[in-house]
Protein backbone atom coordinates (compact mmCIF):
# COMPACT_ATOMS: atom_id res chain seq x y z
CA UNK A 1 0.00 0.00 0.00
CA UNK A 2 1.20 3.52 -0.81
CA UNK A 3 0.24 5.89 2.00
CA UNK A 4 0.51 9.67 1.91
CA UNK A 5 0.73 11.33 5.30
CA UNK A 6 0.26 15.10 5.44
CA UNK A 7 0.84 16.84 8.74
CA UNK A 8 0.63 20.39 10.06
CA UNK A 9 3.81 19.93 12.10
CA UNK A 10 6.90 17.76 11.79
CA UNK A 11 10.55 17.67 12.80
CA UNK A 12 12.40 19.65 14.04
CA UNK A 13 9.20 20.61 15.85
CA UNK A 14 8.47 18.19 18.67
CA UNK A 15 4.97 17.46 19.94
CA UNK A 16 2.50 14.61 20.20
CA UNK A 17 1.47 14.81 16.54
CA UNK A 18 5.08 14.60 15.35
CA UNK A 19 5.81 11.61 17.61
CA UNK A 20 2.63 9.87 16.45
CA UNK A 21 3.39 10.39 12.75
CA UNK A 22 6.99 9.25 13.14
CA UNK A 23 6.21 6.08 15.08
CA UNK A 24 3.33 4.98 12.87
CA UNK A 25 5.49 5.62 9.80
CA UNK A 26 8.27 3.40 11.15
CA UNK A 27 5.87 0.55 11.91
CA UNK A 28 4.03 0.87 8.59
CA UNK A 29 7.32 0.57 6.75
CA UNK A 30 8.28 -2.47 8.80
CA UNK A 31 5.07 -4.08 7.54
CA UNK A 32 6.15 -3.40 3.95
CA UNK A 33 4.06 -0.34 3.14
CA UNK A 34 5.42 2.72 1.30
CA UNK A 35 4.91 5.90 3.31
CA UNK A 36 5.40 9.43 2.00
CA UNK A 37 5.28 12.39 4.40
CA UNK A 38 4.28 15.90 3.32
CA UNK A 39 5.01 18.56 5.91
CA UNK A 40 5.72 22.30 6.29
CA UNK A 41 9.04 23.56 4.97
CA UNK A 42 11.14 24.82 7.89
CA UNK A 43 14.27 26.91 7.47
CA UNK A 44 17.73 25.43 8.08
CA UNK A 45 16.46 21.88 8.47
CA UNK A 46 17.28 19.02 6.12
CA UNK A 47 15.47 15.68 6.26
CA UNK A 48 17.41 12.42 6.20
CA UNK A 49 14.30 10.56 5.03
CA UNK A 50 14.06 10.80 1.22
CA UNK A 51 10.32 10.23 1.37
CA UNK A 52 9.69 13.46 3.31
CA UNK A 53 8.57 16.32 1.06
CA UNK A 54 8.37 19.88 2.33
CA UNK A 55 5.73 22.43 1.33
CA UNK A 56 6.34 26.19 1.33
CA UNK A 57 4.21 28.09 3.83
CA UNK A 58 3.71 31.28 5.75
CA UNK A 59 3.17 31.84 9.45
CA UNK A 60 -0.19 33.17 10.63
CA UNK A 61 0.19 32.74 14.39
CA UNK A 62 3.35 32.76 16.52
CA UNK A 63 2.47 29.99 18.92
CA UNK A 64 4.19 26.75 19.90
CA UNK A 65 4.03 25.04 17.50
CA UNK A 66 3.58 27.85 14.98
CA UNK A 67 0.39 27.87 12.92
CA UNK A 68 1.47 27.60 9.29
CA UNK A 69 -0.51 27.83 6.06
CA UNK A 70 0.75 26.20 2.84
CA UNK A 71 1.69 28.32 -0.18
CA UNK A 72 1.23 27.16 -3.79
CA UNK A 73 4.90 28.01 -4.41
CA UNK A 74 7.14 26.39 -5.35
CA UNK A 75 5.08 23.98 -7.38
CA UNK A 76 7.54 21.05 -7.09
CA UNK A 77 6.11 19.74 -3.79
CA UNK A 78 2.59 19.64 -5.17
CA UNK A 79 3.69 17.88 -8.33
CA UNK A 80 5.47 15.27 -6.22
CA UNK A 81 2.24 14.56 -4.35
CA UNK A 82 0.35 14.13 -7.61
CA UNK A 83 3.06 12.06 -9.29
CA UNK A 84 3.01 9.40 -6.56
CA UNK A 85 0.27 6.85 -7.13
CA UNK A 86 -1.07 6.95 -3.57
CA UNK A 87 -3.78 4.63 -2.29
CA UNK A 88 -4.87 6.81 0.62
CA UNK A 89 -4.07 10.16 2.23
CA UNK A 90 -3.99 10.33 6.02
CA UNK A 91 -3.78 13.80 7.60
CA UNK A 92 -2.73 14.78 11.11
CA UNK A 93 -3.12 18.11 12.84
CA UNK A 94 -6.53 19.42 11.71
CA UNK A 95 -5.06 22.64 10.29
CA UNK A 96 -4.44 24.14 6.87
CA UNK A 97 -2.13 21.34 5.74
CA UNK A 98 -4.74 18.74 6.64
CA UNK A 99 -7.28 20.66 4.56
CA UNK A 100 -4.79 20.72 1.68
CA UNK A 101 -4.50 16.95 2.00
CA UNK A 102 -8.28 16.66 1.75
CA UNK A 103 -8.36 18.71 -1.46
CA UNK A 104 -5.56 16.64 -3.01
CA UNK A 105 -7.31 13.39 -2.11
CA UNK A 106 -10.52 14.62 -3.77
CA UNK A 107 -8.60 15.57 -6.91
CA UNK A 108 -6.80 12.24 -7.03
CA UNK A 109 -9.99 10.29 -6.34
CA UNK A 110 -8.62 8.46 -3.29
CA UNK A 111 -9.87 8.22 0.32
CA UNK A 112 -9.03 10.95 2.81
CA UNK A 113 -8.62 9.99 6.49
CA UNK A 114 -8.09 12.51 9.27
CA UNK A 115 -6.85 11.97 12.81
CA UNK A 116 -8.27 14.57 15.20
CA UNK A 117 -5.49 14.97 17.76
CA UNK A 118 -6.50 18.20 19.48
CA UNK A 119 -9.48 19.70 21.30
CA UNK A 120 -9.17 22.97 19.40
CA UNK A 121 -12.02 24.57 21.34
CA UNK A 122 -9.59 24.79 24.28
CA UNK A 123 -7.05 26.78 22.25
CA UNK A 124 -9.03 29.79 21.03
CA UNK A 125 -6.96 32.10 23.27
CA UNK A 126 -4.18 31.85 20.67
CA UNK A 127 -6.40 33.61 18.12
CA UNK A 128 -6.55 37.31 19.05
CA UNK A 129 -6.96 36.35 22.74
CA UNK A 130 -10.19 34.50 21.97
CA UNK A 131 -12.06 37.73 21.22
CA UNK A 132 -12.90 36.90 17.60
CA UNK A 133 -12.89 33.11 17.23
CA UNK A 134 -15.10 31.45 19.83
CA UNK A 135 -15.20 27.78 20.89
CA UNK A 136 -18.60 27.28 19.20
CA UNK A 137 -17.16 28.53 15.92
CA UNK A 138 -14.25 26.10 16.20
CA UNK A 139 -16.61 23.22 17.02
CA UNK A 140 -18.68 24.03 13.92
CA UNK A 141 -15.55 24.11 11.77
CA UNK A 142 -14.36 20.77 13.10
CA UNK A 143 -17.76 19.21 12.47
CA UNK A 144 -17.80 20.51 8.90
CA UNK A 145 -14.28 19.18 8.33
CA UNK A 146 -15.29 15.78 9.70
CA UNK A 147 -18.27 15.70 7.34
CA UNK A 148 -16.03 15.75 4.25
CA UNK A 149 -13.65 13.05 5.51
CA UNK A 150 -13.89 9.47 4.29
CA UNK A 151 -12.51 8.17 7.58
CA UNK A 152 -12.12 9.68 11.04
CA UNK A 153 -9.66 8.59 13.73
CA UNK A 154 -9.17 9.80 17.30
CA UNK A 155 -6.45 8.70 19.74
CA UNK A 156 -8.86 8.30 22.66
CA UNK A 157 -12.46 7.92 23.75
CA UNK A 158 -12.30 11.48 25.09
CA UNK A 159 -11.60 12.97 21.64
CA UNK A 160 -14.27 10.77 20.08
CA UNK A 161 -16.83 12.07 22.57
CA UNK A 162 -15.74 15.64 21.80
CA UNK A 163 -16.48 15.15 18.10
CA UNK A 164 -19.82 13.57 18.87
CA UNK A 165 -20.66 16.57 21.06
CA UNK A 166 -19.82 18.83 18.09
CA UNK A 167 -22.44 16.99 16.07
CA UNK A 168 -20.26 14.59 14.07
CA UNK A 169 -22.46 11.70 12.89
CA UNK A 170 -19.92 9.60 10.99
CA UNK A 171 -18.28 6.50 12.42
CA UNK A 172 -15.21 7.37 14.47
CA UNK A 173 -12.37 4.88 14.92
CA UNK A 174 -10.21 5.02 18.06
CA UNK A 175 -6.54 4.18 17.45
CA UNK A 176 -4.20 5.45 20.19
CA UNK A 177 -0.76 6.78 19.38
CA UNK A 178 2.22 4.92 20.83
CA UNK A 179 5.90 5.44 21.56
CA UNK A 180 9.15 3.56 21.03
CA UNK A 181 9.33 1.78 24.39
CA UNK A 182 12.93 0.68 23.87
CA UNK A 183 14.04 4.31 24.27
CA UNK A 184 12.74 4.46 27.84
CA UNK A 185 13.86 1.12 29.25
CA UNK A 186 17.60 1.37 29.91
CA UNK A 187 18.52 4.92 30.84
CA UNK A 188 21.07 6.26 33.29
CA UNK A 189 20.06 8.46 36.19
CA UNK A 190 21.81 11.72 36.96
CA UNK A 191 21.01 14.03 34.03
CA UNK A 192 18.72 16.45 35.90
CA UNK A 193 20.70 16.27 39.14
CA UNK A 194 23.86 17.26 37.29
CA UNK A 195 22.31 19.91 35.07
CA UNK A 196 20.61 21.79 37.92
CA UNK A 197 23.11 20.93 40.70
CA UNK A 198 20.46 19.04 42.67
CA UNK A 199 21.88 16.97 45.57
CA UNK A 200 21.90 13.26 44.77
CA UNK A 201 19.76 12.45 47.79
CA UNK A 202 17.00 14.94 46.82
CA UNK A 203 13.86 13.77 45.03
CA UNK A 204 12.66 15.21 41.70
CA UNK A 205 9.10 15.83 40.58
CA UNK A 206 8.79 16.13 36.80
CA UNK A 207 6.23 17.49 34.38
CA UNK A 208 6.60 17.73 30.61
CA UNK A 209 4.82 19.75 27.96
CA UNK A 210 4.55 22.87 25.88
CA UNK A 211 4.52 25.95 28.10
CA UNK A 212 1.05 27.17 27.14
CA UNK A 213 -1.81 28.61 29.20
CA UNK A 214 -3.98 25.55 28.63
CA UNK A 215 -1.42 23.22 30.26
CA UNK A 216 -2.21 24.45 33.80
CA UNK A 217 1.38 24.80 35.04
CA UNK A 218 0.52 27.49 37.64
CA UNK A 219 -1.57 24.88 39.45
CA UNK A 220 1.48 22.63 39.82
CA UNK A 221 3.74 25.51 40.88
CA UNK A 222 1.32 26.64 43.58
CA UNK A 223 0.82 23.04 44.68
CA UNK A 224 4.60 22.64 44.97
CA UNK A 225 4.73 25.73 47.20
CA UNK A 226 2.50 23.91 49.69
CA UNK A 227 4.51 20.71 49.40
CA UNK A 228 8.01 22.12 49.74
CA UNK A 229 7.27 23.68 53.13
CA UNK A 230 7.45 20.16 54.59
CA UNK A 231 9.60 18.42 51.92
CA UNK A 232 12.65 20.64 51.55
CA UNK A 233 14.63 17.85 49.91
CA UNK A 234 12.37 17.94 46.84
CA UNK A 235 12.80 19.75 43.52
CA UNK A 236 10.38 20.33 40.66
CA UNK A 237 11.54 20.23 37.01
CA UNK A 238 9.37 21.61 34.22
CA UNK A 239 10.57 20.24 30.87
CA UNK A 240 9.35 22.14 27.84
CA UNK A 241 9.35 25.49 26.13
CA UNK A 242 6.72 27.93 24.95
CA UNK A 243 5.16 31.34 25.28
CA UNK A 244 4.35 31.13 29.00
CA UNK A 245 7.97 30.66 30.14
CA UNK A 246 8.45 34.23 31.37
CA UNK A 247 5.12 34.25 33.22
CA UNK A 248 5.89 30.94 34.92
CA UNK A 249 9.35 32.16 35.94
CA UNK A 250 7.82 35.30 37.43
CA UNK A 251 5.36 33.21 39.42
CA UNK A 252 8.21 30.98 40.63
CA UNK A 253 10.22 34.01 41.72
CA UNK A 254 7.25 35.60 43.48
CA UNK A 255 6.77 32.40 45.50
CA UNK A 256 10.50 32.29 46.38
CA UNK A 257 10.91 28.96 44.59
CA UNK A 258 13.61 29.84 42.05
CA UNK A 259 16.11 27.50 43.73
CA UNK A 260 13.62 24.64 43.83
CA UNK A 261 11.84 24.87 40.48
CA UNK A 262 13.91 24.38 37.34
CA UNK A 263 13.01 25.00 33.69
CA UNK A 264 14.78 22.94 31.05
CA UNK A 265 13.34 24.97 28.15
CA UNK A 266 13.84 23.09 24.87
CA UNK A 267 15.26 19.58 25.23
CA UNK A 268 16.50 17.56 22.26
CA UNK A 269 14.34 14.51 21.57
CA UNK A 270 17.22 12.08 22.15
CA UNK A 271 17.74 13.45 25.68
CA UNK A 272 14.15 13.15 26.88
CA UNK A 273 14.62 9.55 28.06
CA UNK A 274 17.38 10.82 30.39
CA UNK A 275 15.04 13.51 31.72
CA UNK A 276 12.42 10.92 32.64
CA UNK A 277 15.01 8.49 34.01
CA UNK A 278 16.24 10.97 36.61
CA UNK A 279 12.80 11.82 38.04
CA UNK A 280 11.02 10.11 40.92
CA UNK A 281 7.37 11.09 40.29
CA UNK A 282 5.62 12.44 37.21
CA UNK A 283 2.95 15.07 37.87
CA UNK A 284 0.49 16.51 35.36
CA UNK A 285 -2.35 19.01 35.51
CA UNK A 286 -3.47 19.68 31.93
CA UNK A 287 -7.08 18.79 31.12
CA UNK A 288 -6.86 19.62 27.41
CA UNK A 289 -5.08 16.44 26.30
CA UNK A 290 -6.66 13.88 24.01
CA UNK A 291 -4.09 11.24 24.96
CA UNK A 292 -1.01 12.88 26.46
CA UNK A 293 2.05 11.09 25.06
CA UNK A 294 4.27 12.57 27.77
CA UNK A 295 2.19 10.65 30.34
CA UNK A 296 2.75 7.48 28.31
CA UNK A 297 6.49 8.22 28.14
CA UNK A 298 6.59 8.71 31.91
CA UNK A 299 4.82 5.38 32.45
CA UNK A 300 7.19 3.63 30.04
CA UNK A 301 10.07 5.08 32.07
CA UNK A 302 8.71 3.42 35.19
CA UNK A 303 7.46 6.58 36.91
CA UNK A 304 4.38 6.68 39.13
CA UNK A 305 1.95 9.31 37.87
CA UNK A 306 -0.15 11.81 39.79
CA UNK A 307 -2.50 13.70 37.49
CA UNK A 308 -5.53 15.94 37.68
CA UNK A 309 -8.35 13.58 36.76
CA UNK A 310 -8.96 13.43 33.01
CA UNK A 311 -10.62 10.75 30.90
CA UNK A 312 -7.73 10.97 28.42
CA UNK A 313 -5.66 8.88 30.85
CA UNK A 314 -8.31 6.32 31.86
CA UNK A 315 -6.34 3.36 30.48
CA UNK A 316 -3.02 4.50 31.92
CA UNK A 317 -3.39 6.39 35.22
CA UNK A 318 -5.23 3.92 37.44
CA UNK A 319 -5.91 5.30 40.90
CA UNK A 320 -4.09 3.28 43.54
CA UNK A 321 -2.30 1.10 40.97
CA UNK A 322 -0.10 3.22 38.67
CA UNK A 323 -0.51 6.48 40.59
CA UNK A 324 -3.35 8.78 41.58
CA UNK A 325 -6.16 10.58 39.79
CA UNK A 326 -6.72 13.75 41.79
CA UNK A 327 -9.31 16.52 41.68
CA UNK A 328 -8.02 19.98 40.81
CA UNK A 329 -7.31 20.74 44.44
CA UNK A 330 -3.81 21.81 45.46
CA UNK A 331 -4.07 20.50 49.03
CA UNK A 332 -5.17 17.02 47.97
CA UNK A 333 -2.65 16.88 45.14
CA UNK A 334 0.19 17.86 47.49
CA UNK A 335 -0.90 15.18 49.99
CA UNK A 336 -0.73 12.48 47.31
CA UNK A 337 2.73 13.62 46.22
CA UNK A 338 3.95 13.64 49.79
CA UNK A 339 2.54 10.15 50.35
CA UNK A 340 4.59 8.75 47.48
CA UNK A 341 7.72 10.68 48.44
CA UNK A 342 7.60 9.13 51.90
CA UNK A 343 6.93 5.56 50.74
CA UNK A 344 9.72 4.20 48.54
CA UNK A 345 8.13 0.75 48.23
CA UNK A 346 4.76 2.11 47.10
CA UNK A 347 6.38 4.57 44.69
CA UNK A 348 8.45 1.86 43.06
CA UNK A 349 5.50 -0.52 42.84
CA UNK A 350 3.34 2.11 41.14
CA UNK A 351 6.20 2.76 38.70
CA UNK A 352 6.55 -0.91 37.77
CA UNK A 353 2.81 -1.26 37.28
CA UNK A 354 2.69 1.90 35.16
CA UNK A 355 5.39 0.49 32.88
CA UNK A 356 3.56 -2.84 32.56
CA UNK A 357 0.24 -1.16 31.75
CA UNK A 358 1.86 1.09 29.15
CA UNK A 359 3.47 -1.91 27.47
CA UNK A 360 0.24 -3.91 27.47
CA UNK A 361 -2.11 -1.19 26.19
CA UNK A 362 0.07 0.63 23.66
CA UNK A 363 1.86 -1.97 21.54
CA UNK A 364 3.05 -0.34 18.33
CA UNK A 365 2.82 -3.34 16.01
CA UNK A 366 -0.72 -4.19 17.13
CA UNK A 367 -1.97 -0.58 16.79
CA UNK A 368 -0.33 -0.21 13.37
CA UNK A 369 -1.99 -3.37 12.08
CA UNK A 370 -5.27 -1.97 13.36
CA UNK A 371 -4.58 1.21 11.38
CA UNK A 372 -3.86 -0.79 8.20
CA UNK A 373 -7.11 -2.72 8.63
CA UNK A 374 -8.95 0.59 8.96
CA UNK A 375 -7.29 1.93 5.79
CA UNK A 376 -8.51 -1.18 3.92
CA UNK A 377 -12.02 -0.83 5.34
CA UNK A 378 -12.30 2.79 4.20
CA UNK A 379 -10.83 1.98 0.79
CA UNK A 380 -13.30 -0.87 0.27
CA UNK A 381 -16.34 1.37 0.72
CA UNK A 382 -14.89 4.52 -0.85
CA UNK A 383 -16.73 5.96 -3.84
CA UNK A 384 -14.91 8.76 -5.67
CA UNK A 385 -16.76 11.81 -6.89
CA UNK A 386 -17.62 12.55 -10.52
CA UNK A 387 -14.79 12.10 -13.00
CA UNK A 388 -15.78 15.23 -14.92
CA UNK A 389 -15.45 17.40 -11.80
CA UNK A 390 -12.05 15.93 -11.05
CA UNK A 391 -10.87 16.64 -14.59
CA UNK A 392 -11.95 20.26 -14.27
CA UNK A 393 -10.22 20.59 -10.91
CA UNK A 394 -7.06 18.97 -12.24
CA UNK A 395 -7.00 21.32 -15.23
CA UNK A 396 -7.39 24.30 -12.89
CA UNK A 397 -4.58 22.96 -10.73
CA UNK A 398 -2.27 22.57 -13.74
CA UNK A 399 -2.88 26.22 -14.63
CA UNK A 400 -2.12 27.19 -11.01
CA UNK A 401 1.15 25.24 -11.14
CA UNK A 402 2.13 27.01 -14.37
CA UNK A 403 1.33 30.40 -12.91
CA UNK A 404 3.28 29.78 -9.70
CA UNK A 405 6.21 28.44 -11.70
CA UNK A 406 6.26 31.67 -13.71
CA UNK A 407 6.21 33.68 -10.46
CA UNK A 408 9.10 31.61 -9.08
CA UNK A 409 11.17 32.23 -12.22
CA UNK A 410 10.50 35.95 -11.97
CA UNK A 411 11.43 36.03 -8.26
CA UNK A 412 14.64 34.07 -8.88
CA UNK A 413 15.72 36.01 -11.98
Image (cartoon, rainbow, N blue to C red):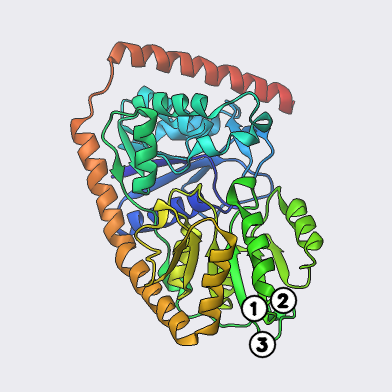
Q: Residue drawn 51% across and 15% down?
A: 399
Q: Secondary structure at mark 1?
A: helix
Return the residue at label 1: 191
Residue at position x 41%, y 76% in the image: 350
Of the image marks 3 and 2, the number of the one nearer the N terminus: 2
Provide the residue designation for mark 3. Answer: 200
In this view, the residue in front, 217 or 330, is 330
Mark with earlier residue (1, 3): 1
Say which of 150 and 216 sits in front: 216
What is the residue that sits farthest to the left in this orientation? Answer: 380
Q: Does the CB distance between marks 1 and 2 fall below 8 Å?
A: yes
> In 3D space, how far apart are the residues under numbered discs 3 and 2 (Cα atoms)?
12 Å
* Quarter of the figure that contains the C terminus: top right
Whether residue 186 sits left or right of residue 372 in the image: it is right
Q: Position of residue 188 (x, y in %)?
A: 56, 83
Kindly identify which residue carries mark 2.
Answer: 195
Residue 365 vs 36, above or below: the answer is below
| Real-space Cα separation, disc 1 to disc 3, in angstroms | 11 Å
Amino acid sequence: MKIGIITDSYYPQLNGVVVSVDNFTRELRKLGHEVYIFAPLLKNYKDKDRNVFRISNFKVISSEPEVLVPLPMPRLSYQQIFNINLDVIHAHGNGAFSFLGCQIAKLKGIPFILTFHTVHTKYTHYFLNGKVIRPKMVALGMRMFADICDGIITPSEKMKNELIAYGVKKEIKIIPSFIDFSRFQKNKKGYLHKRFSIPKTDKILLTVGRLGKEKNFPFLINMFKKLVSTKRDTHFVIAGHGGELSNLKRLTSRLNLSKKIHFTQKVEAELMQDVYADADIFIFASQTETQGLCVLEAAASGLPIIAVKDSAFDNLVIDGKTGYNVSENQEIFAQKVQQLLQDDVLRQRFGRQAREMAGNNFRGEYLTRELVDYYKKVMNVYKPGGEMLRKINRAALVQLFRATNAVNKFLNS
